[in-house]
Amino acid sequence: MLSRPPLADCRVNKRWGWRRAMALVEDMEAAGVAARLEHFRSAVVACSKTKQWRHALPLLARMRAAGAVPDVQTMTAAISSCPPQQADDALSLMQEMRSEGLAPNEVTYNVVLSICAQAGRWASTATLLEEMRSEGHQPTPYQYNCAFAACERSQRWREAVALYRRMRADGLRPTALSYTHLVSVLERGKRRKQAVAVLEEMLAESPRESVVNFNILMNACAKARHWVHAAALFAEMRAAGIAPDVVSYNTLINAYARCGRVAEAEDALHEMAGGAALAAPDVVTYGTVMQACAASGQGQRVLDLFEEMVAAGVKPNVMAYRGCIIACEQRGRWEEALALFDRMCAEGGALEPDRVTYNSAIACCAHLRLWRRGVALLDDMRQRGVTPDQYSYNSAVAACVKARQTQQMAAVLARMREAGFSPDLVTYSNLIQCFGDARLWGRAVQLIEEIKTAGAGMPDAVCYNGAINACAKCGEWEHAEQLVEDMIACGVEPDTITYNSLLNAYAKKGEWAKALTALETMRERGITQSAMTFGAAIQACERAREWERAVALLSKATAAGVPPTTFAYNFAMSACVHAGRLDRALELLEEMKGKVYM
């Protein structure tokens, strides 16, 4: 006697789940009881409910080995167990059905089309619809909608338009969902006029009998970035005596957010939060408004909304935390961002940080030079099943570089290569900074040449500036000059940072004439001259004991609207003292006091 209820009881699928179903089949086999078609079918159906394709597909082979031939229902259930990533398996199973003389029914087509839609397999959906017609089946609106969804997911607007025309030719009326997919793919394909035309056609044809109808129509307007139509539908819904629900408000707010109408989005949120609406704001409501504020550069408002959400008793989700953490990072509030990240992880449950959230946290570690924390977060990503990307590794490398942890940087770089990522310009700029900090100017210069042959693209201004700065720290002004020339020859425009680094190189060796030439070049090229620019030039004059030129540069800086720094005055006074002009040095000291530099 078996210790578990018989598999023939179809309730097994709901009561015990796929694990129990598999165990029951194994019990039958161990007890020498021949499993029949209905037993295997029940097990396959149980597996399909939770997408256990790794268990469902081998069951088919066990069925055949046991002499039980799969029927249409069993094969359809096996196909249904396949997630979108296994679309090829789903299509292969359908071909198996045909080769075994089993004709796919409408449910089979629905299942395969749905899987292909989620996978963005637009060509497969088109082929399936043609197969249906050749077999005498008229595709249904649901099946067309699957094909529309596949086109939307893969951004194939031309194919979506052709599908729409064929649907019309078949005498089928597009549903609101058909229009939604079509409008979305047209908008994403930058076919705005066509999207608006389809939207207007949808508004003219679609029923408006319930809140669900209105919500679907407003969603199409949101996807088309047409907030005016969405707002008009919302007003029409109210005028018809249909009370908007939370989905209605969220859809309207999404339309506002997509169009950058932040004030209108906040007004709708406040209407809900203030009790003027029957629907209270949920985490989606707050999250959408927060995203709109973030997109418009209102980082502080994002943080305020997060606090409002928590105060209202709405539990933040991953999107809300992510938006807040990114807002903190962008505003330089790195400790606060990491505190929010820790709070998110401590809550557990469904609040698992995603890649974007991890990347933001690691970037904050880099800013704070918390290299151990940055590397630990990289490890934590992999342990939680979140795959690090190029940005993740680059941020961890940056954390090590800023903390001057050369060995750790090399270790992270090695892991990055093992993961299949080649260094990009961001990686190289970090490496150049690392060698510059270590005063290994030669390695920094070599990396510029390596970039050109490594397939990472041409060095950008950040890479060149880092290498020039490395040379400057060691007083290697000749190599710094060569890098500037190479930079210009490669079509990369030098900027203030470039020339400041070059001037620092001149200053180290007292190359005052070259420093003055560099100042003139900056003026001719329209490059902004900063206090650091003049300070470096004055330092070059001080080293060469050119006190008159050092003093003249102070006046020149003031005339250019760049107040000299304390360091600039100190270098100028030092030049005067070394030249025996103590009187002029004292005058500069009084001048500096008058400008509140003391």
Image (tube, rainbow, N blue to C red):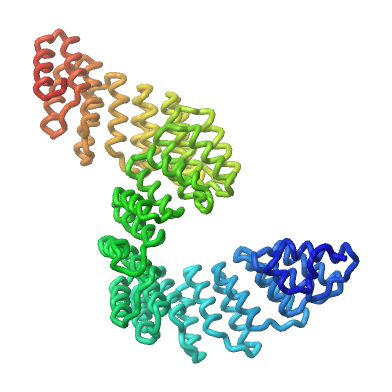
Quarter location, residue 4? bottom right
Nearest the eye: 344 or 151: 344
Q: In the image, residue 312 lies at what x, y percent?
A: 36, 55
On the rendered structure, is 215 left or right of 109?
left
On the rendered structure, is 70 left or right of 389?
right
- Above or below: residue 135 compared with residue 28: below
On the rendered structure, is 514 left or right of 474?
left
The quadrant the N terminus occupies is bottom right
Nearest the eye: 557 or 82: 82
Residue at figure coordinates x 16%, y 23% from the top left: 597
- In this orientation, does residue 394 appear? yes
Most distant residue in the top direction: 580
Residue at figure coordinates x 54%, y 44% from the top left: 422
Residue at figure coordinates x 71%, y 72% from the top left: 11
On the rendered structure, is 218 left or right of 370?
left
Quarter location, residue 508? top left
Q: In the image, residue 291 lies at what x, y percent?
A: 36, 57
Nearest the eye: 97 or 105: 105
- In this orientation, does residue 445 appear? no
Nearest the eye: 127 or 287: 287
- Above or below: residue 373 compared with residue 141: above
Q: In the image, residue 559 lies at what x, y percent?
A: 10, 32
Q: In the image, residue 408 lies at what x, y percent?
A: 53, 31
